[in-house]
Structure formats: C-alpha cells, structure tokens
Image (cartoon, helix red, strand yellow):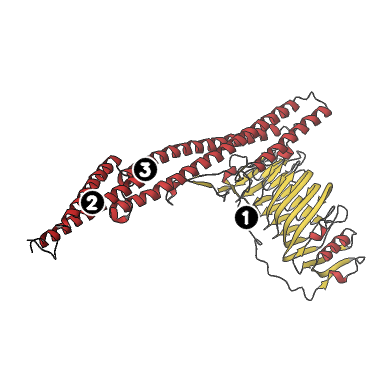
Amino acid sequence: MQSVNTNLSSLIIQTNLKSSTKCLNIAIERMSTGFKINHAKDNVANFSISTKLSSQISAYEVAEDNAIAGLEMLTTATEKLDIISEHLTRIRELAELAQNGTYGKASIDAINAEIKAHGTEINRILKSAKYEDEIFTEKFHETRGGFINKVTKRDTSTMTTLASVNENTSISSGTYSISTAEELAKLATMTNSNKIGAGAEFVLANDIDLSVYSDGEGWIPIGAKYASFKGKFDGNGYVVSNLYINNPTKERQGLFGTIVGNVIKNIGIEDVSITGADAVAGIAGYSGEGTIIDNCYVKNGDILATNQRAGGVAGCNLKGVLKNCYTDVNVMSRAIAGGLVGTYSYSYVENCEVYGNVEGGAAVGGLIGLVDFSNQPDGYIKNCILYNNEFGYLDGIFIGGKWWDNRVINYNKYIIENCSYNSKISDLNLIGWEHDYEVEIKNVTQIECKSTPLTSFQIGINGESTDQISCQMKFDIAGLAFLSGTSNKSLYKIDYYLNKISEKQTEFGAMENRLESVLEEISIKYENLVSTQSTIRDTDIAEESSAYIRNQILQQASATLLATANQTPSITLQLL
C-alpha cells in the first residue's frame, strides 16, 4: 500500500541503521579500550567477577611487595649477624691467646683493649642495624608496677618533720617525716656524721624527685662504711625517682650506702643511673647483719659496679632478710652481679622477682651473683621468679657462683625452693661455679614469659592467620663490656654468644626460604588470576574488527537505502 503519512520502509531502515550504528560504536569502544566489558550493563555477572578479580590482583601485587621487603630486611639482618660473628670469632681468638700464660701485663692489656674495641663495635652494629626502622633493638619484656604488697599509707601530719631538726643534733628515738629531696639529703648528712641511732624512724610523706642531684657525683648515699644507717625507714608507699650516682671509684653506692640492723620497707625507686666501684645497688650498697628489706622495688635504669658486687636491691647482703621485693633494671658488674643481690652471705630471700637483665664478667646470677659461705653457711631462696635475661649470659640462672670456706664444719644445707625462671634460658645452669658446698633444690619450674612482639609479614590478601608469617627479629648480646682475655669464663661466654647467633641465623635463613616460597606461590596465583580476568574482560581484536567491518558495511547500506526509502512519499504523490 502506497501511503503519504506512513513510510514503513524508512522506519524499517532507520531501525536497522540505529542497530548497526550501535554495534559499530560498541566495536569501536571495545577495540579502543581493549576491554569487551566496559560497563556493568555489558555483562552483569562477568563485570562483578572481573571487579573482584581486579581487587585480588591488586592485593597480590602488594603481598608480593611485602614479601620482597621482608626478604630484604632478613637479608640485612643476616649480613649484620655475619659481621658480628666475625668480631666474636676474633674475640675468641684473643681470649684463647691470652690464656696461654706466656704474656706479660702489657701484652694482656693490649689484648683486652682489642677485645673491648670489638665488643664496642658489636654493640654499635646491633643498635645501628636498620631497615626503615631498628631491626634488633627495642626489646619488650615482662614487667610489673607498684608494690608486691599493698601499702596502707601512714598519716605523717602529726610527725616531726626532719626539716625542723638541727642537723648537728643526734637522733636516737622518735618518728620523723620526710617530704622533700632536701630533707632526704639532710638524713644522709646526719647519718654520715653518726647522728642517727637505731631507735629513730623516718617515714616518707611524699614522692621525692632527686633530679636536683643529677650533676657531678650526684646523690650522696645515706650511710657510709663507718657511719651506717641504723634506724628504720618506711617509704610509706611513695617513690624516690631520678636517683643519679656517678662514683666509679667509690664503694657502697645506692640510695643507702650502708644499713645495719633494722628495717627498710615500702619504698619504690624509679629511673636510676648508679655507678660505683664495689657494693652498688638501688636500695643499699651494703646491707649488714640483722637488716630486713621488705616490700621495695627498683625500676627503670642501670646499675654498674666497675669492680665487683652489683645488685638490683643490695650490692652485698650479710646475714639479712630480703622479701617481697622486685627489680626491673639492668645490673652490670665486672665481677659478681645479681638481679637482686651481688654478694649474699647467710641471708634469706623470699617472694622476690627479677625482670631486668644481669650481665658481668664472672659470678653472674639471675637472682644472686655470689653466695658466700665463708662466715656460716646457711640461708635460702624461696618463692622467687626470674622473668627475663634472655639476651645475656648467666653463670647460673638463680646463683652465679657459691663459695664455701672448708674450715666451716657445722652448717645447715642451703635451699632453693618453689622458684621459677624464664623457659627461654633453660639451656643455662641453675647454679654457676661451685666450691664443694651442696645446695638443695626443691620444686623449681619454668615459666613462659612475654617476649618482644614478633615482626609479621603480610604475604596473603586476607586477614587470616595463614596470610601472615612471623619472625622474632629482636636480638641482643649483653655483657660484652665485661669480656676479658684473662678470665677463663670468657671462652664459655663467647661460645654461648656464637651459638645464639648461629641459632638466630638459622631462624632467619628458614624465614628467607619461606618468603622465597611465598614469592613463587604469589607469582603463580597472580598469573592465574590475570589469565582468568583476561579471558573474561579483554577484547578479542580479530573478532571485534570483523564485527566493526560488518556493522560499518551495514551502516553504509542502511544509509543508502534510507535515502531511497525517504523518496517513496514523493513517488506516491505522482499518482495524483
């Protein structure tokens, strides 16, 4: 039917022209982008799958970068340990050389100087080893706060203040309060002048900051060798902070220098830097006969004896009692060092804890450096815990060494009972070197302590535990400053350190192998995902070019036919 109002042929051709143009545009888009899915409407299901695959592919790229970074970090650490091992090997050679006995003092001094230089370099390497951040340092360890036993504070408002007492006055009785650093220093002055008697008691009324005594030799201890502190001292649950002492040639250094025959209790000491020659500690350099140190702690800082006998609480404890105390400081001594007490004779230790590291040249014990039985062999250690010291060398976990004078005939057996220690140091002896005296050990157990958090490498794309592998990167060697060529213990220590390095290198090597395996696995997964995504998303250029040509021809044909079809109404008018 010929019609003027309706040109059906034109409409049909227009529809086909639109279709061919649309298909032509799709072919152009696919060939120009390289993707056959450019919008969700192109293929809803495959678009969703492709988007998820893109996320996974990107995640595997990051995981690969993580694994490579971890591998490089471990390589850096291993190379540093190789250098440290070389230094230790040289130290061992020097120590073995010095044991020969054919060298004079000058030669031995030269050997020790080189040993010290190698030790200093090892410490520098450990502290400077970095990959973005420090690799070996920043150790984390078990610790605690406050006092072991709760302290009920005494009312000091009615007590006589020490500030009101003339320092030339002798005090034989009465109870006095101390509120300031100046008053505490006044107690030291009066004690060292033999002005304080056994009947006097002193009670802290406030926390005391001793940072005002942080210059020169620092704090002057309360009590000296021939002018001991004989009174009672109650810290009353308060803390003395910033205790600084720098007397490398003087003995009996601590908050108290010498205490004899009374009670020191309920005092906390924090942030210490104490250096002395002999009998050096946080609470008392020398704790004499009849002294009880109860419910005290020393936390944060370093205690160093340049000669011998360093302890966290007491440098030397003779015929005394130490109970309910703990330390979390680094205790160091050329010889005889203990987390609680340096030298310990005919004394009793009960319910105490050690959290810091202990290091030294000889007689190094986690709790006690040296137990000396030359006076009267008796005493015990009960209910004590050694938490840390996993980076140093101990001659004995509990006791570094014990000495017995064989002239002493009658004695009670020494006892270590109900004590625990860090399982990470189980390869060490419970007691160090011995001199023919039996110690009875009862119910000693190991405990699992908190360690430095592991370094984790995110090598997977999810948050599952299987997507991470972890490694303990932290490592240290304590006590290098006290190695000596003349000490027959040096060879044992060096071998111990070399073994620790070997263990750590083995651990790092195994982790490197795992990371290399991870990289292979990631590569396989990545390639498979990319291949799958390519199949779903990528354009087949040969197919699309054919479609492009076909639709281009159809478009041209439709355009030509449309021109002809549009003339049909004019032809119809010719019939009139």
The kind of residue tagged 3 is: Val
Q: Is mark 3 on a helix, strand or loop?
A: helix
Q: Marks 3 and 1, how far apart in space?
A: 50 Å
Q: Against 508, is 565 above or below?
A: below
Q: Which of 113 and 485 is in front in this view?
A: 113
Percent x, y for residue 435?
Answer: 71, 37
Q: Which residue appears farthest toward the bottom when viewing the image?
A: 158
The kind of residue tagged 1 is: Thr
| Residue beneath the point at 83% across and 71% down | 161
For marks 2 and 3, the one nearer the N-term is 2
Q: Relative to 540, is 254 on the left or the right?
A: right
Q: Which of 380 and 433 is in front in this view?
A: 433
Percent x, y for residue 78?
Answer: 58, 36
Q: Mark 2 points at which residue?
A: 20
For marks 3 and 1, the one nearer the N-term is 1
Is residue 172 in sight in this rendering? Answer: yes
Q: Name the residue under label 3.
A: 530
Foreground label between 1 and 2: 2
Asked if disc 2 and disc 3 are in contact, CB closer than 8 Å, the reply is no
Density class for disc 3 (Cα within 10 Å; few <14, some 14-19, many ≥20) is some
**In the image, which disc is placed on residue 105?**
none
Percent x, y for residue 72?
Answer: 55, 39
Foreground label between 3 and 1: 3
Q: Against 547, is 267 above or below?
A: below
| Residue beneath the point at 40% across and 46% down | 57
